[in-house]
Image (tube, helix red, strand yellow):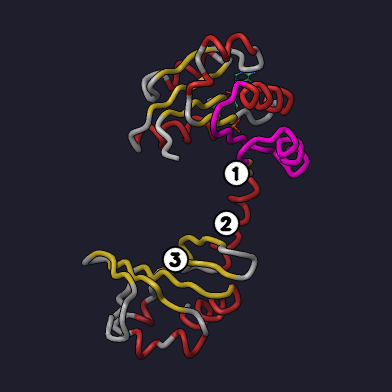
Amino acid sequence: MKMNQFVIIGLGRFGSSLGRELVELGYEVLGIDKDEEAVEEMSDVLTHAVVADSTDEDVLRSLGVRNFDCAVVAIGNDIQANIMTSILIKDLGVKQVVVKALGELHGRVLEKIGVDRIIYPERDMGVRVAHQLVSPNLLDYIELSKEYTIAELAVPKEMSGKTLKELNPRARYGCSIVAINKLRGGIIIAPTAADVLEEKDIMVVIGTNEQIENFEAAVS
Ligand code: ADP
């Protein structure tokens, strides 16, 4: 399902950053916050920004929230307002309801309400930063399962000038380089043995967590 119109409820640090990025990406965004200052700050950035209390069902109806493709509840500290808003929006029948949870228990409540997606920004960012701190070349990663990961690794100086054949990560470590994003010259998908790595290129590696860790440790 292609999303076109988003409504973000709660324009704190998370909600406003999300809204800004969606607008940059070319989407229409309605921002709602009960705090006038928060709305004022975002009024030039978002498509529309209104001062309203999202725990009031009539207000949500009059703003036409049900017509949006996706609603994001980005109210943080006020768990009661977060949960009440989530129920109301779910009941209005918005297709995709995404809610920011403060912790596991809060997340379990949101699951029971039946929201479509629960996000844990602080928890997930903590995990992400921990991985990046212990692996200096790790730029980003996606966990495919508990065991398998796709990682973006910066090519270190020691690897510069080497071909994939010389490096041979599949035979040595069990993981595969599935793409190389060259600093100069674009992205190579499914690189061959003759492709050469250069410092600051980014390699996309797929394998088990252990294989990728061993490969990373060997090259950093
Ligand atoms: P963050 O950690 O992302 O900054 P905050 O909890 O600090 O999150 O901010 C959430 C925003 O949600 C605040 O700007 C606050 O005014 C807004 N908010 C809280 N309750 C409601 C409500 N009932 N209706 C609309 N906005 C609300």
Residue bearing the label numbered 3: 152
Left or right side of 158 for 209: right
Earlier-in-chain disc, 2 versus 3: 2
Earlier-in-chain disc, 2 versus 1: 1
Q: Residue 151, percent across and down?
A: 48, 67
* Disc 3 residue: CB within 8 Å of ligand 1: no
Earlier-in-chain disc, 3 versus 1: 1
Which kind of residue does numbered mark 2 sit on?
Answer: Arg
The residue lying toward the viewer, choosing from 62 and 30, is 62
Residue bearing the label numbered 2: 128
Which kind of residue does numbered mark 1 sit on?
Answer: Pro
- Asked whether residue 80 is drawn in magenta, I would say no
Above or below, 21 relative to 92: below
Q: Residue 213, percent across and down?
A: 56, 76
Q: Quadrant of ligand 1?
A: top right
Bounds of the magenta segment: 92-117
Q: Residue 17, percent across and down?
A: 47, 35
Graded by Cα atoms within 10 Å as few (under 14), some (14 to 19) or many (20 or more), the crowding at tag 2 reads: some
Checking the image for residue 121, the label placed there is 1
